[in-house]
Amino acid sequence: MSQDRNIKWLNDRRINYRKDPVNDKPTIETSLYSYYEYGTYECYHLFRSKAKITTYKSLKWHFYVLYYLNTELQIRHGYTRTIFEFIANKENGFVTFFINDKKLNEMISDIFETGGEPPVNKKRKIIFKDYSGLTPNEKMSIVGKLIGRSSCVDGEAIYQCMLDLNDMNKPITWSKIAGLLNCSTRTIQRNLNDCLRKEKAILNEEI
């Protein structure tokens, strides 16, 4: 049986794990979502979906983001290491694997050397508001209208749909993406590359 994520521990300590774009302004903003026509790299929303951390690489990226979002907390209290150790403990429901102390300490040391700079992030075009009340199907409909309104079906459009499906805890299939982009599955296949195929496998493994 999968252990539920102990998000309450983070909330009780006022740990920041989400940040909306600050410098990038949405092309369209409603009470339900923000749409960035050219995308934004400034959206950091950890633990939004039920997907758990399944790899060392993903765990380290989560650490980078947490360090970046909690720099002031680290300066005031100096317990960012405690946060990392809590996240890395499989019993707390954030990761699917065990990590030994040596590997974890090496990872944490690498994080502290960055100085809290903004981590490399995935570009997002649609950010749904918290407590929007939208069902996954309603969100998919919005994604299809906004991302699919362009006649250009390319790797970027496909990747955006993959990210949105993953956020909604929906398995990624090429037929679903074809439906969102209002094109044939064959068109999707023609625009795929090895990176997209690998990312699809990784995202689906996290669900």
Image: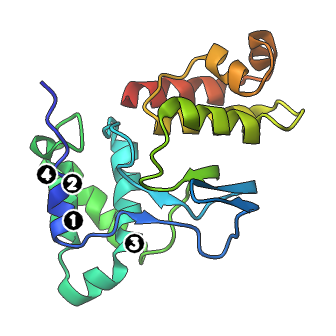
Residue located at (55% from left, 56% from top): 121
Tell which of 189 and 131 is nearer to you: 131
What's the distance in space between the residues labelled 4 and 3, CA to CA? 24 Å
Residue 127 percent across, percent down from the top left: 57, 53
Residue that numbered label 2 is attached to: 7
Whether residue 122 sits left or right of residue 1 in the image: it is: right
Task: Identify the disc placed on residue 69.
Answer: 3
Badge 2 marks a residue whose secondary structure is helix
Q: Are marks 2 and 1 in contact (CB under 8 Å)?
A: yes
Tell which of 2 and 26 is nearer to you: 26
Whether residue 6 sits left or right of residue 132 in the image: it is: left
Name the amino acid type tagged 2.
Answer: Ile
Note whether 114 is above or below 169 in the view shown: below
Residue that numbered label 4 is attached to: 101
- Which of marks 4 and 2 precedes in the sequence? 2
Residue 207 percent across, percent down from the top left: 37, 28
What's the distance in space between the residues labelled 2 and 4, CA to CA? 23 Å
Task: Identify the disc placed on residue 11.
Answer: 1
